[in-house]
Amino acid sequence: MHAWAKILNGWHYNRAIPLSAPQTISAQWKDLEGQSLGSCTLQTFIGGSDQTAVFATTRSNGEKAAIKLAPLDPRTSELKLSRLRQAMRLSHPHLLRIYDAGIGELQGKSLLWVLTSFADEDLSQVLPVRALTPTETGQMLSPVLAAISYLHREGFIHGRIKPSNIMAIGDQVKLSTDSLSVQGDPPLNTLRTAYDAPELKQGKSLPASDMWSLGMSVVNVLTQSVPSLAGGAAKIPDSIPKPFSTIAERCLQVDARQRASLDEIQDLLKRPTQPVVAASAVREPSSVRERTAPRETPVARTAIQGAADEPHKRGINLAYVLPVVALLLILIGLWWNHNSNHPSTANRNSANPSSANQGSGNQAQSRASSPASPIQPPAASAKHTVNPPPQAEPEAARTAEPDGSNVVRQVLPQISAGARSTVTGRVRVSIRARVDAEGNVMRTSFDSHGPSEYFARKAMEASQEWKFARSAGETLWVIRFGFGRKDTLASATRLSR
């Protein structure tokens, strides 16, 4: 499984501010649930914006799919529909499959729709939570580069490379395919973003435009933000390690002719990652050289005197030496005090000749009970040991008065391995459920949404399948889910009867 998939699941909804917005749907997108478009029924509204909406649906063969809607733009919709139908013929393991596309009408508005594979994961969902590691970034880039290379060989320009369009189905990375164009096409996407290459402002779309978008994406996934632009040129943050800083720099050339090729990026990606070293750590002060050199073991007092008399000659950093020497003196003092209160074995043998004739077994026992070395601390010093902090309680143990006796059926969400790998600790979601007298869940709402849209959606879907014991009337419950890397915890608490 690709390690990059430490991301949250869910579709991307373009949040950019349009420069030239086509007509929009006046009603809420969610109101379209249950209506038909093409051969599909819009089942569950997943999300959207003024310009796009995505619904879960089912193909005629029973396969789960997604259908994306956008208001019809008379200037470009026919050409975009043509490109979508051309994209239906593409076949690559790292491209999201397009099954169908068309133009339809709902609530008196003309819409362009495209039916695609249902994506489990979307890379943009993890970036508000954390950046990708260099290892994850490299593992993400390899399949994305393969998909871009295939598109360019087939004569297409992707035109929308960014984290929100880097998806996953199961354990495979997928690049979206609903924004494809060919060189010479007018801009088919009216929404401008920071990922767009400079030449798009003049209405030019080139294969090299994808390289600019890729460079922006590399910086974004490693830093959780796109680089700033100064005079049109992108500033690469110093925190990005090589080879990714080199990849970003080569991709983000204002002149499209100067940008890196796909082959160059693939070659750079094969180079080992070089961590960024702070400038202050490059210079090795004399005190560091002194501390890392082999040490002699003179009497501790001599070491203190030498450090105090000639610090400028020896270059010893007293902030490090004095605590070490003080600790040695304390340990020696403890050992001396311990031995002054317990006469040595030799003295005891001279006072009591019979003890000298004891067997070797007793002698071994005596040696085992005495200190092993002059600086070994006695047992009394154990009070200075710092104990590790206790592990956090599992979620079920922290739930206030859970009432599991009245839960007839408990349904746990089915979570993909890629989504679980994003979790540090537990992702917590609480669902408030209104239950009828028969124990069926009638209505649900979020009591605590949590940081992840994907886990929240999964928790909501599962809670609607719970079943409770019969009661005299409606009851209100809070169903709590705790999602970990290896398991999911669930509990329910009744709020009212």
Image: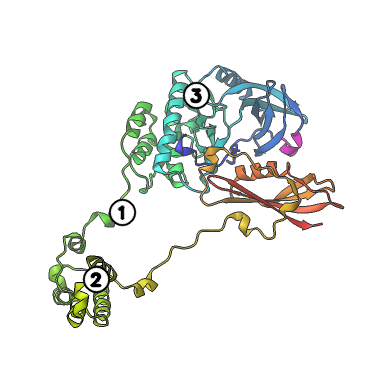
Is residue 293 rendered magenta in the image?
A: no
User: Does dot 2 land on a helix, a strand or a loop?
Assistant: loop
Query: What residue sits 38% from the left and 44% below the top?
Result: 236
Against 485, residue 339 (above or below) is below
Which tag, 3 or 1, sits closer to the chain's start? 3
Across and down, in percent, residue 155 comes to 47, 19
Query: What residue sits 29% from the left and 72% below the top?
Result: 377
Q: How is the image coloured?
A: rainbow
Mark 1 or 2, closer to the camera: 2
Q: Quadrant of the C terminus?
A: bottom right
- Cα separation between marks 3 and 2: 64 Å
Crowd around label 1: few <14 · some 14–19 · many ≥20 (10 Å): few
Quadrant location of residue 348?
A: bottom left
Residue 375 got which mark?
Answer: 2
* Circle 1 residue: 278
What segment is highlighted magenta in the picture?
Answer: 25-33
Across and down, in percent, residue 451 comes to 59, 50
User: Does dot 3 land on a helix, a strand or a loop?
Assistant: loop
Tell me, yes or no, whether the two marked residues, 3 and 1, touch with CB atoms within 8 Å.
Answer: no
Work out whether residue 93 or residue 68 is closer to the camera in this orientation and state it: 93
Quadrant location of residue 54?
A: top right
- Cα separation between marks 1 and 2: 38 Å
Q: Amino acid at mark 3?
A: Pro
Q: Amino acid at mark 1?
A: Ala
Which tag, 1 or 2, sits closer to the chain's start? 1
Work out whether residue 418 or residue 274 is closer to the camera in this orientation and state it: 418
Work out whether residue 437 or residue 293 is closer to the camera in this orientation and state it: 437
Across and down, in percent, residue 341 comes to 27, 82
Residue 93 got which mark?
Answer: 3
